[in-house]
Amino acid sequence: MKKKIKSILTMVLALCLTLGLTPGVMTQASDLTETSITKEYLPYGSYFETEIIQTSTLLRSSTKSASKTTTYKNDKGESLWYAKVSANFTYTGSTSSCTSATASAGSYNSVWKIISKSASKSGHTGTAKVSAKCYLGFLPVGTINQTVNISCDKNGNIS
């Protein structure tokens, strides 16, 4: 009996290798992930880098999950803080809707502190609003308010 089970498992494994399939790939084949990155330069060399990640489920082609992260970076390219919106969408070809939105934010160093964050959804757009404050020791020296919007059009295109 053990030889028969071992023989069957060997044949299944050989078949998977012959077809170029592995169990991990087979279970993840129903999702498609796309990523895009843009940069917006500010005075003095600092910039916002924005990354959009979207996942489509092939089994339910009318839904998408996506996130948009905007990271504030200094002139050396070091990340200082980020604001992120994550959202779920449905679309039909004639309309689209944002079904949920969440906000997250964080600081990569002690100079910048996140002082507030909130999320909202309206129509086909999810929004995160984040405020980050810069400190020189204990003295606040500046605040940046960042709004990150992510939208889905009627055809499932994320922007």
Image (cartoon, rainbow, N blue to C red):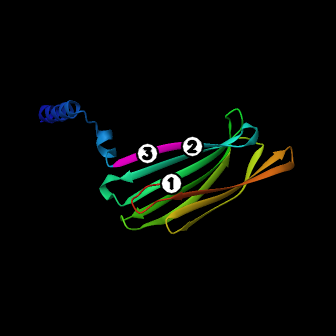
Q: Which of marks 1 and 3 is nearer the N terminus?
A: 3
Look at 47% across and 66% down and name the residue there. Answer: 99
Q: Could you say where residue 80 lies in the image, as x and y percent from the top left? A: 70, 42
Residue 7, located in which quarter of the rendered image? top left
Q: Earlier in the sequence, mark 2 or mark 1?
A: 2
Give the side of residue 46 with respect to residue 88, left or right: right
Look at 70% across and 32% down and name the residue there. Answer: 76
Type of amino acid under label 1? Ser
Mark 3–mark 2 Cα distance, whole angstroms, equals: 14 Å
User: On the rendered image, what quadrant is the N terminus found in?
Assistant: top left
Kindly report which numbered mark, 1 or 3, lies closer to the viewer in this rendering.
Answer: 1
Q: Is mark 2 on a helix, strand or loop?
A: strand
Q: Nearer the viewer, residue 158 or 104?
A: 158
Q: Mark 3 — residue?
A: 34
Question: Is there CB contact under 8 Å for labels 2 and 1?
Answer: no
Q: Mark 1 — residue?
A: 159
Type of amino acid under label 3? Glu
Give the side of residue 141 with respect to residue 25, left or right: right
Crowd band around label 3 with a 10 angstrom C-alpha radius: few (<14), some (14–19), many (20+): few
Q: Which of 4 and 24 is in front in this view?
A: 24
Mark 2–mark 1 Cα distance, whole angstroms, equals: 11 Å
Look at 52% across and 52% down and name the residue there. Answer: 67
Mark 1–mark 3 Cα distance, whole angstroms, equals: 12 Å
Q: Is mark 3 on a helix, strand or loop?
A: strand
Type of amino acid under label 2? Thr
Q: Nearer the viewer, residue 56 or 158?
A: 158
Query: Which label is found at residue 18?
Result: none
Which span of residues is magenta-colored?
Answer: 31-38
